[in-house]
Image (cartoon, helix red, strand yellow):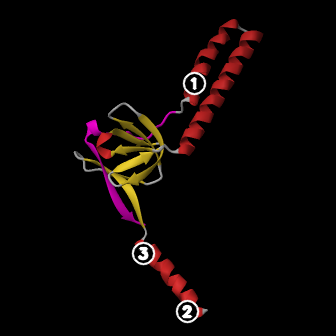
Amino acid sequence: MKKTVLLLSFLCFINLITAQIKAIKVTNEATQKEKIIKENRRVKVFTLDGKKLKGRFKIESNSILIQGESINLSDIIAMKRNPLLVSIVTGSFLVYLGSITVGIGVLIGLLADSSAFLLTIPGAGLIYAGLKPPNFNKKFKTKRNWTFEIITISD
C-alpha cells in the first residue's frame, strides 16, 4: 500500500514538472513589448478576409481554432482580449442606466415639462451601447508592428 501511494505521488509530481501550456506571444517589433495570451482565453480576432471571430481559442500547430474555424497566424490582422465578465458587467450597467434615463425622462415629461422627453435620446443610446458592450482592451494590430507567435510556457 505504501509503495502504491509513493508511486502515485511520484507520477503526479512528474506530471506537474512536464506540464506545459501553449500560448500566443504578441510582440511589438518597434518597442519590444511582449504580451502573452494563454490558450482557452476569450479573444476577438480580425482576419484578412474581413471575418470577426469571438470566443475561446485553441492552438493547433501553426494556427488557432475559434468556434470550430481554423485561422493561420499569418491571416490575423488584429487581436484583442475579450473577457466575459467585463462584457457582462459593462453591458448590463449601460442597459440599466439607459432604462433609468428613459424612465425618468418619460415620467418628468408626462408630469412636469414636455421638454424632458429629450432625455429618452441619450437613454436609447445607452441601451444600444449596452446591447453591444464596449471592449476597452488594447487591440494588437499588425499595422502597428505587432507580431503573433505560438509559444509553449511551463506552468
What's the CA distance linking mark 2 and mark 1?
64 Å
Q: Is disc 2 surrounded by few (<14), some (14 to 19) or many (20+) residues within 10 Å?
A: few
**Residue 132 horizontal side relative to residue 43, left or right:** right
Q: Height in image: 116 above or below 61?
A: above
Outermost residue toward the right in this view: 111
Which comes sooner in the sequence, label 2 or label 1? Answer: 2
Q: Is disc 1 surrounded by few (<14), some (14 to 19) or many (20+) residues within 10 Å?
A: some
Label 1 SS? helix
Query: Which amino acid, mark 1?
Result: Tyr
Reading the image, the residue beneath label 2 is 3
Query: Which amino acid, mark 2?
Result: Lys
Residue 64: give x, y in percent of width and height. Answer: 39, 48
Residue 53: give x, y in percent of width and height. Answer: 44, 38
Residue at 22% in and 45% down: 30
Along the viewing direction, whichever of 6 and 113 lies nearer the viewer:
6
Q: Residue 17 magenta-drawn?
A: no
Which comes sooner in the sequence, label 3 or label 2? Answer: 2
Range shown magenta: 134-155
Name the image quarter holding residue 101.
Answer: top right
Reading the image, the residue beneath label 1 is 128
Residue 60: give x, y in percent of width and height. Answer: 38, 54
What's the CA distance linking mark 3 and mark 2?
21 Å
Label 2 SS? helix
Reading the image, the residue beneath label 3 is 17
Along the viewing direction, whichever of 93 and 19 lies nearer the viewer:
19
Eye-nearest disc, 3 or 2: 2
